[in-house]
Image: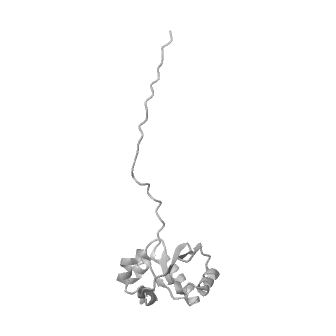
């Protein structure tokens, strides 16, 4: 007589988590790489005779005389400067990934560069401060502390 075999099915537990799935970390760059990109920005806007100013973490590092840090270089131009001259030089030297009335994005040797077009007529942008930072003078929003408090609204 053959033995009878019975099978028992044991349900596997279902695990439900409410934790957010972590984002893939952005690549960060060192001071030398970011400064190289910033000098590239400086050259680009100098050629087009377009005034620009530092924004975001790029401005923060300059203002506090710290090493650059982060995953991109961020600068701004006033909407009055966003014209055929500045766009023409951008198109001639850099192939922008995206370009619209609010920002221009391109890479400089693999470093993302964000150029924000500032539509605010605030004196902090029309009369920027000037600061020496790693062998060059750069414009910063003025007063910087006011800009830093409001930076996410631009």
- For the point 53% across and 82% down, which residue is it? 41
> Which residue is at the front of the view, 140 or 117?
117
Q: How many marks?
A: 0
> Which residue is at the front of the view, 56 or 40?
56
- For the point 42% across and 40% down, which residue is it? 14
- For the point 39% across and 79% down, which residue is it? 60
Residue 145 is situated, as x and y percent measured from the top left of the image, at: 35, 82
Residue that protrudes farthest toward the right in the picture? 92
Residue 12 is situated, as x and y percent measured from the top left of the image, at: 43, 35
Q: Is residue 135 visible?
A: no
- Rendering colour mode: one colour
Residue 122 is situated, as x and y percent measured from the top left of the image, at: 42, 86
Please identify the quadrant where the C terminus is shown: bottom left
Q: Within the image, what quadrant is residue 9 found in?
A: top left
Q: Within the image, what quadrant is residue 45 found in?
A: bottom right
In the shown orientation, is residue 69 left or right of residue 91?
left
Q: Is residue 96 visible?
A: yes
Q: Within the image, what quadrant is residue 22 found in?
A: bottom left
Residue 59 is situated, as x and y percent measured from the top left of the image, at: 42, 80
Residue that protrudes farthest toward the top in the picture? 1
């Amino acid at each position: 007589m053959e033995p009878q075999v019975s099978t028992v099915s044991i349900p596997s537990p279902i695990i439900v988590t409410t934790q957010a799935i972590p984002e893939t970390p952005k690549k960060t760059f060192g001071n030398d790489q970011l400064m190289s990109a910033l000098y590239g920005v400086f050259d680009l806007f100098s050629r087009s005779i377009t005034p620009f100013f530092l924004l975001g973490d790029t401005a923060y590092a300059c203002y506090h005389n710290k090493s650059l840090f982060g995953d991109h270089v961020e600068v701004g131009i006033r909407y009055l400067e966003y014209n055929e001259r500045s766009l023409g030089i951008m198109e001639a030297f850099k192939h922008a990934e995206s370009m619209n009335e609010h920002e221009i994005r391109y890479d400089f040797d693999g470093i993302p560069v964000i150029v924000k077009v500032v539509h605010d007529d605030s004196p902090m942008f029309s009369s920027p401060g000037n600061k020496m930072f790693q062998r060059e003078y750069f414009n910063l929003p003025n007063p910087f502390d006011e800009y830093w408090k409001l930076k996410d609204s631009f």
